[in-house]
Image (tube, helix red, strand yellow):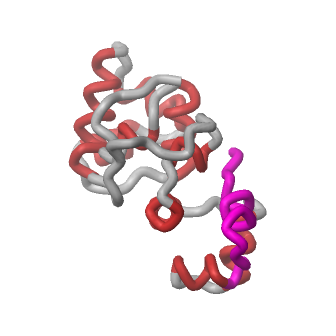
Amino acid sequence: MYFRLKELRLNNNLLQKNMANVLNISEITYTHYESEYYIIPLKYLIILCDYFQVSLDYIFGFTTNNNYTDHINGYSLEKFGLRLKQYRKENKLTQNVLACDLNTNRSVIANYERGRTLIATPFLYTICKKYNISADYLLGRINEPINY
């Protein structure tokens, strides 16, 4: 996976310490996220998107457009679940097929679709990259679907 964390930080003349403070984590943890030694949790990516006023699709490297005009801060588990299910059904994918794509089980997909849990960063990245759909749309951060 490729994230634009370092690029965003440097373009805004910030230190890793500043970013750690924004996320309320240790500097070493942030350093590991930025170097992709650890995978940054989605909840932190959303905080950074809101802080820098950029799209998640931009941070993921799916687009060079750094923001959408109609973006909404945060995310919606309920919208994510509904949109994931709708997208899966429109594309004739079963929960089992999607689970197989993510190397997980069907119950994980079912929990995402019910809005019970926030999707793991690598799962969201994989879905969006493989199926060319906007992470911001799936998470309810924008209202119109965008395909890449």
Judge by depth and name the residue closer to the eye, 145 or 79: 145
Please name the residue shown 33% across and 34% down the image: 84
> Which quarter of the image is occupied by the N terminus?
top right
Residue nearest the viewer, comparing 46 with 99: 46
Residue 50 against residue 1 in the figure, above or below: below
Place of residue 33 in the rendered image (x, y in percent of width and height, measured from the top left): 68, 66
Q: Is residue 144 left or right of residue 46?
A: left
- The magenta segment is 1-17
Along the viewing direction, whichever of 20 and 12 lies nearer the viewer: 12
Say if 146 sits above or below 52 in the image.
above
Q: Is residue 11 magenta?
A: yes
Q: Residue at x 34, y 24 (%)?
A: 88
Answer whether residue 58 is magenta in the image.
no
Name the residue located 38 percent from the left edge and 42 percent from the top edge. 69
Give the side of residue 134 with respect to residue 92, left or right: right
Out of 126 and 110, give the one closest to the viewer. Answer: 126
Q: Residue at x 23, y 37 (%)?
A: 82
Q: Position of residue 47 (x, y in %)?
A: 46, 66
Is residue 107 among the parts visible in the rendering? no
**Quarter of the rendering containing residue 93:** top left
69 lies above or below 127 = below
Q: Position of residue 145 (x, y in %)?
A: 35, 28
